[in-house]
Image (cartoon, rainbow, N blue to C red):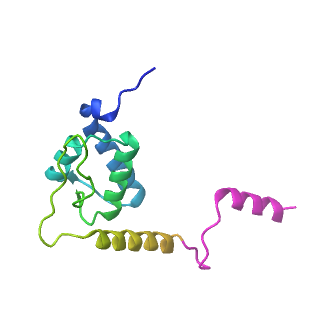
């Protein structure tokens, strides 16, 4: 059975974008109410050589970096590819790759710090808690 690539199913992109944004925003406790038009247009024009996995990764990164309720991709996120799709243009004063990297690292650090328990250690997994309770009950 042959499944067509994402570039052959451009009509699926809006549905997938909505799904992935709501999925990742929910996981990260963020509210994303709309998608910037320039970002949406660029996502529809891009050929997605990495198919749905690339789309998923791009959206996850965008949600991590989102600071408002409007989803937008930073310039250079979608490179110009061999199919001639346009790159999202950089406006003066927009973030550089180094700034983006620093923001991602800061968010990940906050996420890790927020998952620490009262002892400063990560909370035990459900499996580990069950095992510990069984062992203490013996």
Q: Which residue lies furthest to the right in this view?
A: 138
Q: Residue furthest bottom?
A: 119
Q: Which residue lies furthest to the left in this view?
A: 92
Please name whichever residue, 33 or 62, is drawn nearer the observer in this view of the structure. Answer: 62
Point 39% across, 74% down: residue: 106
State the image coordinates of residue 128 (x, y, percent, origin top left).
Answer: 70, 60
Range of the magenta residues? 116-138
Please name whichever residue, 115 or 2, is drawn nearer the observer in this view of the structure. Answer: 2
104 left or right of 39? right
State the image coordinates of residue 112 (x, y, percent, origin top left).
Answer: 50, 71
80 left or right of 62? left
Q: Is residue 63 above or below residue 97?
A: above
State the image coordinates of residue 74 (x, y, percent, origin top left).
Answer: 24, 61
83 left or right of 48? left
Point 26% across, 52% down: residue: 78
The image quadrant of residue 103 is bottom left
State the image coordinates of residue 95 (x, y, percent, origin top left).
Answer: 23, 70
Please name whichever residue, 54 or 107, is drawn nearer the observer in this view of the structure. Answer: 54
Q: Is residue 91 above or below residue 120?
A: above
Please name whichever residue, 95 or 67, is drawn nearer the observer in this view of the structure. Answer: 95
Point 34% across, 46% down: residue: 55
The image quadrant of residue 119 is bottom right
Q: Does the magenta stretch include residue 126?
A: yes
Q: Does the magenta stretch include residue 90?
A: no
């Amino acid at each position: 059975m042959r499944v067509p690539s994402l570039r052959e199913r451009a009509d699926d992109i809006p549905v997938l974008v909505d799904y992935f944004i709501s999925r990742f925003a929910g996981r990260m406790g963020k509210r994303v109410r709309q998608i910037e038009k320039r970002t949406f247009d660029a996502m529809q024009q891009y050929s997605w050589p990495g198919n749905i996995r690339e789309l998923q990764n791009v959206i996850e990164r965008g949600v991590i970096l989102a600071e408002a309720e409007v989803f937008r991709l930073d310039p250079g996120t979608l490179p110009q590819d061999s199919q001639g799709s346009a790159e999202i243009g950089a406006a003066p004063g927009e973030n550089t790759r180094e700034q983006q990297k620093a923001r991602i690292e800061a968010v990940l650090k906050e996420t890790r710090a927020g998952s620490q328990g009262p002892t400063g250690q990560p909370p035990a997994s459900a499996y580990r808690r069950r095992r510990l309770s069984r062992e203490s009950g013996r």
